[in-house]
Image (cartoon, grey):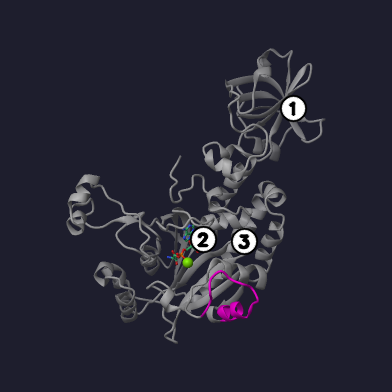
């Protein structure tokens, strides 16, 4: 009789005694007594291992004494209550099939490794408890993003990865070309672009916003969720060259509705993780950041503070803190300013709105004061900015003026301007940095450790 294979997670969630089961996974440890071997098997479905008891007299368990850490096996046997300490359930093995014995050079022998070392073996680190847990939580959060928007009737739009425009206007674009490098050097810029694959300059997208806006003005409430790319040469613990962004865009919505939605999304994601990832989260609570349960509880239970940029600048000026960068009206908030507000002043998330127009992109709506735009950032403890968004400039003449002011060629954006020519309405949206969200939930302090394979300046291994 063949026995259907089970995941360890499922077996532990709904165990049945004297059920015969089959699990497949990797040996974490082996201990031997005179007549038995005890194996801890992990299959990646959850943090917990399954204890396997192999009787040396059982013919199907031949060779168990050779199993090493990292070896791959299938185990068939009876699931039973474990009389031992440390686990409720165990499998009494009848048959152990060995796929491969891992040699002693396996780098993940049972001891603690530093995050720096594990980054150098990113191809193996998902096999550790911490990284397995982090990437299971990441997966749950991605699911929760879709659930949040779908439950409110948002339509999911796949905006393009290759684009001909620069949404943020910050010039941090990765060029995309199919021209052989030699040809590129022989041609001047204009003819190179003309002979290139698309017949014009192309790059990887920094944001799906502009395309999301076009869909919002047709389908109402939409969102896009995908990879984005920025050639920012900043080697910080919260910037990556390739990261995922969640970008909702809502028609007939002004700045305050935008802030409400952003706050609800962050709360929803944290609650979802608390409810569905308790075992994995517990690892982070105990070994990564002891203050994390309190931070997450605050996010879920307390309304986010809301202050204008001008108020934020006043608070920062009045504070006795010594900041690395000077602060005055017109200067952008730096990470240490943001963290002061979220960690010391408000002790929780804070939303800052109405930034000076000079430091924000062309698409943000100019306020009646003429000096500020209807921008908003969500700032959280430990990280700083996690969301950036705005109400969009819906008036054609103002938008054209802002594009000229920021040095953009309006003829390149004719399609975007058309959306303000035909049926323009107030609309708003924002971008949530998905990696920063995973950092917030797990307490992991470096973005390199929440990306399966991080792309940062000078680093494209794996
Ligand atoms: O504030 P940003 O640049 O906003 C936009 O891109 C808008 N077009 C979004 C919109 O309104 N639809 O980026 C949004 C968020 C930031 O708050 C941050 O969390 C994250 O994206 N982010 C990065 N995350 C990792 N690495 C980077 N280099 C990031 N740059 C931005
Ligand atoms: Mg921003």
Going from the N terminus, do you reach mark 2 or mark 1 first?
1
Of residues 180 and 272, the one nearer the viewer is 180
Tell me if residue 247 is in the magenta stretch. no
Task: Confirm whether residue 52 shows in the render.
Answer: yes
- Which residue is more in the foreground, 198 or 236? 236
Give the residues in magenta: 311-328
Please, what secondary structure does the residue beneath circle 2 have? helix
Q: Earlier in the sequence, mark 3 or mark 1?
A: 1
* Spot occupied by residue 390 in the image (x, y as percentages of width and height): 46, 72
Task: Please rate how many residues cluster around mark 2, counting C-alpha atoms within 10 Å: few if below 14, some from 14 to 19, many from 20.
Answer: some
In front: mark 3 or mark 1?
3
User: Badge 1 is on which residue?
Assistant: 18
Residue 52's x, y, as percent? 71, 26
Which of the two discs, 2 and 3, labels the residue nearer the N terminus?
Answer: 2
Total number of numbered labels? Answer: 3
**Residue at horizontal 29 percent and vertical 56 percent from the top:** 202
- Determine the residue positioned at 58% across, 63% down: 266
Q: Is residue 417 left or right of residue 235?
A: left
User: Residue 319: within the magenta?
Assistant: yes
Label 3 – label 1 distance at C-alpha: 48 Å
| 115 is higher (above) or lower (below) than 303 | above
Q: Which one is nearer the viewer's eye here, 393 or 408?
A: 408
Q: Which quadrant of the figure contains the N terminus?
A: top right
Q: Residue at x 43, y 73 (%)?
A: 360
What residue is pinned by disc 3?
Answer: 382
Name above or below for residue 358 compared with residue 225. Answer: below
The verdict on label 1 being within 8 Å of ligand 1 is no
What mark, if any, has residue 149 been given in the picture?
2
Mark 2 → mark 3, Cα distance in angstroms: 26 Å
């Amino acid at each position: 009789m063949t026995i259907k294979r089970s995941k360890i997670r499922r077996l532990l969630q709904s165990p049945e005694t004297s059920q015969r089961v089959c699990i497949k996974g990797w040996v974490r440890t082996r201990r031997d007594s005179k007549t038995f071997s005890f194996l801890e098997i992990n299959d990646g479905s959850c943090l917990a291992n399954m204890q396997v008891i192999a009787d040396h007299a059982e013919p199907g368990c031949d060779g168990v004494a050779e199993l090493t850490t990292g070896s791959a096996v299938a185990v068939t046997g009876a699931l039973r209550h474990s009389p031992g300490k440390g686990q409720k359930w165990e499998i009494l093995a009848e048959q152990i099939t060995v796929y491969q014995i891992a040699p002693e050079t396996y780098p993940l022998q049972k001891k603690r490794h530093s995050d720096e070392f594990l980054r150098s073996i990113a191809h193996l680190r998902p096999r550790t408890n911490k990284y397995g847990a982090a990437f299971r939580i990441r997966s749950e959060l991605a699911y929760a993003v879709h659930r949040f928007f779908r439950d409110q009737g948002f339509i999911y739009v796949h905006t393009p990865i290759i684009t001909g425009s620069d949404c943020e206007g910050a010039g941090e674009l990765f060029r995309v070309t199919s021209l052989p490098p030699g040809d590129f050097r022989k041609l001047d810029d204009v003819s190179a672009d003309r002979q290139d694959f698309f017949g014009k300059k192309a790059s990887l997208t920094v944001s799906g916003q502009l395309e999301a806006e076009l869909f919002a003005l047709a389908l109402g409430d939409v969102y896009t969720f995908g990879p984005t790319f920025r050639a920012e040469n900043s080697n910080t613990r919260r910037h990556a060259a390739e990261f995922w962004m969640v970008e909702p865009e809502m028609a007939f919505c002004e700045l305050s509705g935008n802030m409400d939605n952003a706050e609800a999304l962050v709360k929803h994601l944290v609650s979802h993780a608390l409810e569905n990832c308790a075992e994995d989260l517990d690892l982070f609570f105990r070994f990564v950041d002891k203050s994390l349960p309190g931070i997450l509880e605050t996010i879920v239970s307390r309304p986010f503070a809301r202050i204008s940029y001008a108020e934020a600048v006043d608070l920062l000026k009045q504070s006795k803190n010594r900041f690395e960068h000077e602060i005055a009206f017109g200067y952008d908030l730096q990470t240490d300013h943001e963290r002061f507000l979220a960690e010391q002043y408000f002790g929780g998330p804070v939303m800052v709105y109405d930034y000076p127009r000079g430091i924000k992109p062309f698409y943000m709506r100019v306020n009646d004061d003429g000096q500020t735009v209807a921008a908003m950032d969500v700032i959280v403890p430990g990280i700083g900015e996690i969301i950036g968004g705005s109400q969009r400039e819906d008036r054609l003449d103002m938008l054209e003026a802002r594009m000229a002011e920021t040095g953009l060629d309006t003829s390149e954006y004719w399609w975007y301007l058309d959306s303000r020519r035909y049926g323009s309405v107030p609309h708003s949206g924002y971008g949530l940095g998905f990696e920063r969200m995973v950092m917030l939930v797990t307490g992991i302090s470096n973005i390199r450790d929440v990306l399966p394979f991080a792309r940062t300046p000078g680093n494209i291994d794996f």
